[in-house]
Amino acid sequence: MGGINKTLIEVGGKTIIDRAVNLLTPLFSEVILAGWPVGQSLPAGTISVSDNYPGKGPLAGIEAAMKSSRTPFIFVFGGDMPSLSGELIAMQIEKFAEKPADVFVPRIGDLIEPLHTICSCSIHSSLEAYLKSARKPAVRDFFSLVNVRYFDLPETDEYLRVFTNINTPGDLPG
């Protein structure tokens, strides 16, 4: 997408980040935006944290959010996901609460969505150690080191749409 801040892309007259914040605010006591660009206006009701491990990708944002969170668990989402579903997130929270794990990842068949995940902040020190040691840290690789539980979902157009992120103009919803 040419290096633009994908969270500021408008979909249906609202930016992706405004859509996400409006959806997440009623569900969570805090909405933390990791890696938010310096000088960019922060959406109302959110907290911005800088990556403590710049250049280490999404895991650096997860680490920064865990470190600053006032809660024992965080919901991790991709800032370029325009079709988040409050109903699906609420269902994921409910299923997670039945049997907590370090990480609770949605899965459709063999497809997992690591950036729509509930993470326990208790794994923060493990994540920090991984970030310090891994040359090219990958979310999926880190998840293989902790207690992961999967949230199995049927393969429907609705769920696949929720997990779609924007990488090219063709990925934008119609």
Image (cartoon, helix red, strand yellow):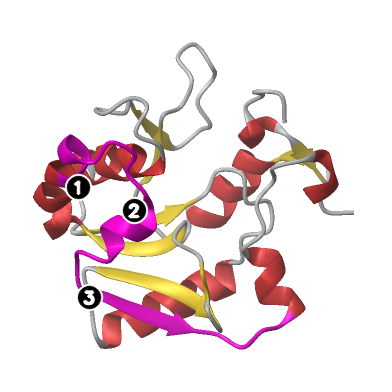
Please identify the quadrant where the C terminus is shown: bottom right
CA gap, disc 3 and disc 2:
20 Å
State yes or no: residue 111 in magenta. Answer: no
Q: Earlier in the sequence, mark 1 or mark 2?
A: 2
Do tag 1 and tag 2 residues touch (Cβ < 8 Å)?
A: yes
Q: List the residue tagged with mark 1.
A: 70
Check the image and report above or below for 102 versus 16.
below
Q: List the residue tagged with mark 3.
A: 101
| Helix, strand or loop status at disc 2 | loop
Mark whose residue sits in front, 3 or 2:
3
How far from the left and from the top, in percent, is residue 143?
29, 63
Check the image and report above or below for 63 versus 98.
above
Q: Amino acid at mark 2?
A: Ser
How far from the left and from the top, in percent, is residue 107?
50, 77
Q: Amino acid at mark 3?
A: Ala
Q: List the residue tagged with mark 2.
A: 29
Look at the image and give the residue range highlighted in magenta. Answer: 130-156
Q: Earlier in the sequence, mark 1 or mark 3?
A: 1
**Which residue appears at 67% of the width and 24% of the height?**
4
